[in-house]
Amino acid sequence: MTGIPVSWPAPLSALLADLPLPVSAGAVIAAVLPWFNLALGLALAGWTLLFLFRIVLTWYPQVDLGKGVMRLVAIPTEPLLAASRRLIQPIGGVDVTPVIWVGLISLLRELLVGQQGLLSLIALRAQGLVAAVG
């Protein structure tokens, strides 16, 4: 059986190394991206904490999420939870959608701003360009 040889895609770091960026764009990216990386990481970590609070609050069904400080937890999380509850029914009477969202947000955070995340690799590439020119 003859076939076409399959070549696997190069690692992301190799693709980023071949990415041609003008020096000025590299300098701008090197200056802005670390702050964006930090802000996005903090926002995703805060969102994860809000979903963790929702997990704890499922143990206390008498808590009204529409009053007081609990609204700060409910407002950013309820739209996603309401949509996912339509797809995923409670298992044994337990709402598992906050646990699923904690996992998804943690995965997204790791893929974007983790140590080997996409934005981290782009920032390293941009810093390398600025260091090579300057």
Image: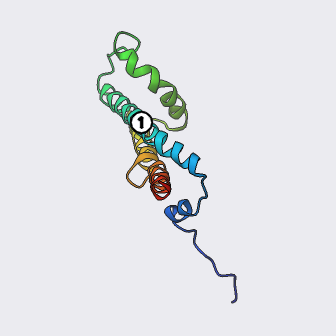
- Image quarter hosting the N terminus: bottom right
Q: Residue at x 53, y 62 (%)?
A: 17
Q: Is 58 located above or below residue 108 in the figure?
A: above
Badge 1 is on which residue? 44
Instruction: Name the residue nearer the viewer: 68 or 41.
Output: 41
Residue 32 appears anywhere in the view: yes
Q: Is residue 39 left or right of residue 8?
A: left
Q: Residue at x 61, y 58 (%)?
A: 20
Asked where in the image residue 51 lies, by quadrant, the reply is top left
Asked where in the image residue 91 lies, by quadrant, the reply is top left
Q: Is residue 29 left or right of residue 54?
A: right
Q: Residue furthest front?
A: 134
Image coordinates of residue 31 in percent, x first then y, are 47, 41
Q: Residue at x 65, y 81 (%)?
A: 5
Q: Residue furthest bottom?
A: 1
Q: Number of callouts in the render?
A: 1
Q: Is 79 located above or below residue 94 in the figure?
A: above
Q: Is residue 33 left or right of residue 58?
A: right
Q: Is residue 117 left or right of residue 15?
A: left
Residue 91 appears anywhere in the view: no
Image coordinates of residue 29 in percent, x first then y, are 52, 44
Q: In the image, what residue type sits under mark 1?
A: Leu
Image coordinates of residue 59 in percent, x first then y, are 29, 27
